[in-house]
Amino acid sequence: MQAQELLAKARRVRLPGHGPADAVMAGQYRSAFRGSGMEFEESREYAPGDDAGALDWKVTARMGRPFVKRFREERERTVMLAVDVSRSMADAAPGGPPLAEAAAVAACALALGAAASRDRVGLVLFSDRVEAFVPPGKGPGRAVAVAHALAGTTPAGTGTDPGPAMALLAAALAHRSVVFVFSDFLGQGFAAPLGRLARRHEVAAVLLAGPGAGILPPYGLLTVSDLETGARATLDCGDPAARTRYAAARTTRREALLAGLRAAGADLLELPADAPPDAALTAFFHRRGRGGRVGKSRLRGA
């Protein structure tokens, strides 16, 4: 997919009841990630219509009447997009797009939103190494640069090791930032580098999944292979015991993956590869905007 086609698809991303990504996405993530871009300004007396969740309990107790905290937005923030481009991300269901394409469209939509909001946006592509890096910058041209890197990078690595990419981001991001990590998370070793990054930044793990992932045919021999190592095994789909073992192994792996991401302090966004990202992004932003996020709020000065 060429960069212009990618940009066109990203601009068609719409949030239900709203407009295109470059007009609305910025406000959505700004609200959802306000903990990384708001600074305490003052406490003032409560007025009808104020957010009760912003009550300043210490001042309220001292003054004997309700006060609320006021925050002001920092002049800019940084949104970093880390996209897994390892071999397994080329996986696709029959007739469906590769996981990598779904990740690229969603990442590009976020880049457009950041640019429209006059925030800084950057990109790192990784496999078992750093494949490409677009330093964070401002303006529509930076979103275009992100699209060109997503569309024009041919990965040299085949496996998955997020460590070098996460270390690069930790070194490159001097101030608290929002980091989206797009991957199928099939590789090992995500928890530790994500955890280190989440100590200073807001990290969202974007889990890509293809349609019908894990669904076996009712009968026959099925050869399954590891897309990164090439290892193969044969599964008898007509054997109830084999089907049970397969389902149990997938469930165990998924539970371990989600537990590892939660323990690392990363929020989770599940993104289906066979559908536009609109609904998944909307649900994620709304949940975060209501305070449904991992860890405690990190509003400085509060």
Image: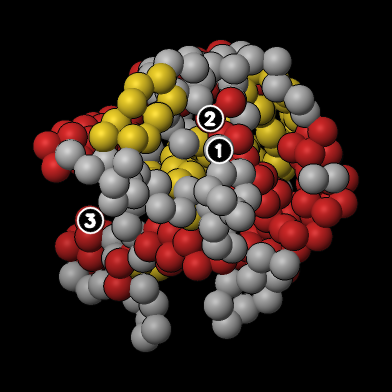
**Residue at the far bottom in the pictured view:** 48
Relative depth, front residue between 170 and 18: 18
Question: Pointer 3: what residue?
Answer: 58
Q: Secondary structure at mark 2?
A: helix
User: Which residue does the image show at 12% across and 37% down from the upper left?
Assistant: 241
Relative depth, front residue between 120 and 142: 142
Residue 32 seen in render: no
Q: Amino acid at mark 3?
A: Lys
The number of numbered badges drawn on the structure is 3
Question: Pointer 2: what residue?
Answer: 88
Question: Pointer 1: what residue?
Answer: 91
Residue 160 image point, x, y percent: 51, 19
User: Which residue does the image show at 17% across and 62% down from the upper left?
Assistant: 61
State the CA–CA distance, disc 2 to disc 3.
52 Å
Question: Quick check: marks 1 and 2 in contact, CB under 8 Å?
Answer: yes
Marks 1 and 3: which is nearer the front?
1
Q: Amino acid at mark 2?
A: Ser
Q: Quadrant of residue 90?
A: top right
Disc on the earlier residue, 2 or 3: 3
* Mark carried by residue 66: none
Q: Amino acid at mark 1?
A: Asp
Residue 227 image point, x, y percent: 50, 25
Q: Secondary structure at mark 3?
A: helix
Name above or below for residue 293 compared with residue 247.
below
Q: Is 153 displayed left or right of 98 in the figure? A: right
**Residue at the far front in the pictured view:** 220
Q: Secondary structure at mark 1?
A: loop
